[in-house]
Structures are given as structure tokens and as C-alpha cells.
Image: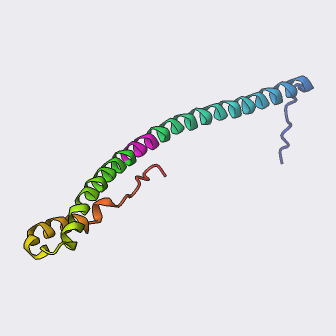
Amino acid sequence: MEVHAHSHTDRKKWTHYFWKFFMLFLAVTLGFFVENQREHYVEHQREKKYIKSLNSDLEADINRLTAIIQLRNERALLLDPFSKLLNSKEALLHSNNLYYYNSFATRGVAFRFTPVDGTM
């Protein structure tokens, strides 16, 4: 049976191990800081995107509310003659006008507000 003798290598100083540890520690620490900066940048870009989306949602809501207010004002103007015709003695003579005013007075679908919440 042969015995293999291990060749003797020079013993390394403790400073060699210290520098290996220091370089590894430095690489991990810098990697952490770089990843943290990258994450901060990505979150900042995402924040800008959400702000733009929220702004467009608010503009759509404002436009819809403006249209609803205009429709409600028109409806209010039509309700006065409608109520006068209903209370008049000649209501049957004005059945065409009553039908016309009634179609606007009782229609409530166009007056409902549903907010745009795509950003949420």
C-alpha cells in the first residue's frame, strides 16, 4: 500500500485571510447599497406612473360630473313645464308634450355617477 505524502504548502499569514474577508464583506455591502438604490429608482418611476394615471382618472371624473350637472340642469328646466302641464285642466289636450317631458323627467340612468377607479 502506497502512502501519498502531501506536499507542504507555504502557510498563509492572517493578513491574507483578513483581506479575503474584507473584500467579500465589501462586495456584499456594496451590492446591498446598489440594490437599494435601484429599488428606490424603480419605486420613484412607479410613483410617477400612478400619479399620471390618477390624474387622468380625476379628469375623466370631472368631465363626467360636468356632463351630469348639465343634464340635471336641463332636466330641472323641463320639470317646471311638466309639472304645470300635469296640474293644468287641459292635461289631456297636451298629451304629446306630457309624453315628451315625462321621457326626460323619469330617465335616471344618465344621471348616475360611477367614478373611474382604474388606478385604485
Front residue of 3/45: it is 45
User: Where's residue 21, x and y in %?
Assistant: 82, 30
Q: What residue appears at the point 70 percent right and 34 percent down from the top-left corner?
A: 32
Tell me where residue 75 appears, x and y as whole percent. 26, 58
Magenta-colored span: 53-60
Q: How is the image coloured?
A: rainbow
Main SS, magenta residues: helix
* Residue 108 among magenta residues: no
- Does residue 88 sit above or below 36 in this rendering? below
Give the percent coordinates (x, y) of residue 80.
25, 61
Is 35 displayed left or right of 45 in the figure?
A: right
Q: Is residue 31 left or right of residue 20?
A: left
Q: Quadrant of residue 23?
A: top right
Give 62 or 106, whichever is nearer the viewer. 106
86 or 21, which is in the foreground? Answer: 86
Q: Nearer the viewer, residue 22 or 105?
A: 105
In reply to whether residue 56 is colored magenta, the answer given is yes
Q: Please tell me which residue is depicted at 86% across the width and 28% down the height of the picture.
A: 17
